[in-house]
Image: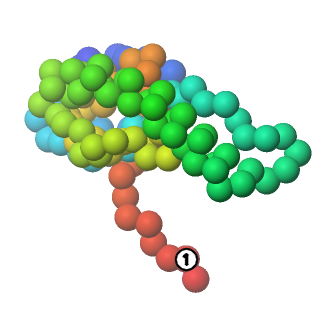
Amino acid sequence: MDELHEISREGKISQSVTARLAQLSPTQVLRAIVVLKAEAKSGPAGRRPNRQERQKVIDEVRNSTSKSLQEIDAILTRFNGHRISKIPTAIGTIAVETTPAGIAALSKSDLVKAILPDQPISRVI
């Protein structure tokens, strides 16, 4: 069994990404969304936050997750991958492109909360 299948991913990799990884050769790349662990204070309790409070939480998420980017980039480089997103989103996600081994390595990082498929959003009617 190869390294990818031996790694305990602690539930970080979604089922759809795991299924896709099983179909790829070790040198093929795939795009994925990496959810980074963020440290941000929640908004005010008991009421809807105003625009400034929401922006403050977004800034806190981006600042805390941006600290992880150097380590994430090092993992991606080791496995012939790269980060597609320049900065984390408001919810602390980044898009990456890497090999199956790169996905497995990311899943072992304490900085990563989850790995999801990067797929188009379609309209449901």
The residue closer to the viewer here, 55 or 68, is 55
Give x and y (percent) for residue 96: 28, 41
- The residue furthest bottom is 125
- The residue furthest front is 52
Which residue matches tag 1? Answer: 124
| 33 to 70, vertically: above or below | below
The residue closer to the viewer here, 72 or 78, is 72
Identify the residue shown where x is 39% and y is 41%. 88
| 4 to 125, vertically: above or below | above
> Is residue 84 in view from this perspective?
yes
On the rendered structure, is 35 left or right of 49? left
- The residue furthest right is 46
Give x and y (percent) for residue 5: 33, 23
Q: Amino acid at mark 1?
A: Val
| 5 to 58, vertically: above or below | above
Identify the residue shown where x is 50% and y is 76%. 123
On the rendered structure, is 30 left or right of 77? right
Please state, as top left, top right, bottom left or bottom right, where the N terminus lies in the image: top left
On the rendered structure, is 35 left or right of 27? right
Give x and y (percent) for residue 122: 45, 72
Give x and y (percent) for residue 63: 45, 31
**How many numbered badges does the structure rendering display?**
1
Identify the residue shown where x is 55% and y is 77%. 124
On the rendered structure, is 39 left or right of 28? right
Identify the residue shown where x is 59% and y is 42%. 56
Q: Classify mark 1: residues with Cα within 10 Å, few (<14), some (14-19) or many (20+).
A: few
> Is residue 13 in view from this perspective?
no
The residue tagged with tag 1: helix, strand or loop? Answer: loop
Locate residue 120: give its quadrant.
bottom left
